[in-house]
Image (cartoon, grey):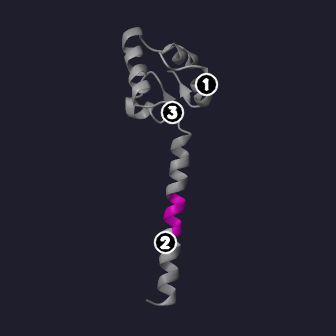
């Protein structure tokens, strides 16, 4: 393989890494509507795993939509630390 081909390969690989990193960062900042989000979407929140995400969905099915982002703290196991970690990303519509 020529030097130019190796350099091109390295540049393509570097471009892919940069592209993938940018996408991951953008997804990490995405707003999540806790009234419509699926379990898979809710687990993207910091400190929210599968079980807590399922509790959020069950809570809104039993109690209706959240009126304020802070209302997520009514869900068992979701407290001030979890809310603070996510308050910029949680929306209700």
Badge 1 or badge 2: first in the primary sequence = 2
Q: CA distance from mark 3 to mark 2?
A: 32 Å
Q: Position of residue 12 (x, y in %)?
A: 49, 71
Q: Secondary structure at mark 1?
A: helix
Q: Position of residue 71 (x, y in %)?
A: 54, 14
Query: Image point 52% across, 81% down: which residue?
Result: 7
Q: Secondary structure at mark 2?
A: helix
- Does residue 15 belong to the magenta stretch? yes
Query: Image point 57% across, 31% down: which residue?
Result: 89
Magenta stretch? 14-19
Q: Which residue is mark 3?
A: 45
Instruction: State which mark lies toward you, 1 or 2.
Output: 1
Mark sitting on residue 72: none
**CA neighbours of label 1 inside 10 A, class few (<14), some (14 to 19), many (20+):** few
How many numbered badges does the structure rendering display? 3
Q: Which residue is mark 1?
A: 81
Image position of 79 with respect to 15: above or below: above
- Does residue 3 belong to the magenta stretch? no
CB contact under 8 Å: marks 1 and 3: no
Q: CA distance from mark 1 to mark 2?
A: 41 Å
Mark sitting on residue 12: 2
Near-viewer residue (20 or 53): 53
């Amino acid at each position: 393989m020529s030097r130019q081909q190796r350099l091109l390969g390295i540049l393509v690989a570097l471009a892919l890494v940069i592209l993938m990193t940018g996408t991951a960062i953008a997804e990490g900042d995405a707003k999540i509507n806790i009234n419509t989000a699926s379990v898979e979407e809710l687990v993207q929140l910091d400190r929210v795993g599968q079980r807590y995400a399922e509790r959020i969905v069950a809570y809104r099915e039993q109690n209706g939509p959240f009126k304020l982002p802070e209302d997520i703290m009514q869900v068992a196991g979701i407290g001030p630390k979890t809310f603070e970690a996510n308050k910029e990303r949680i929306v209700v519509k």
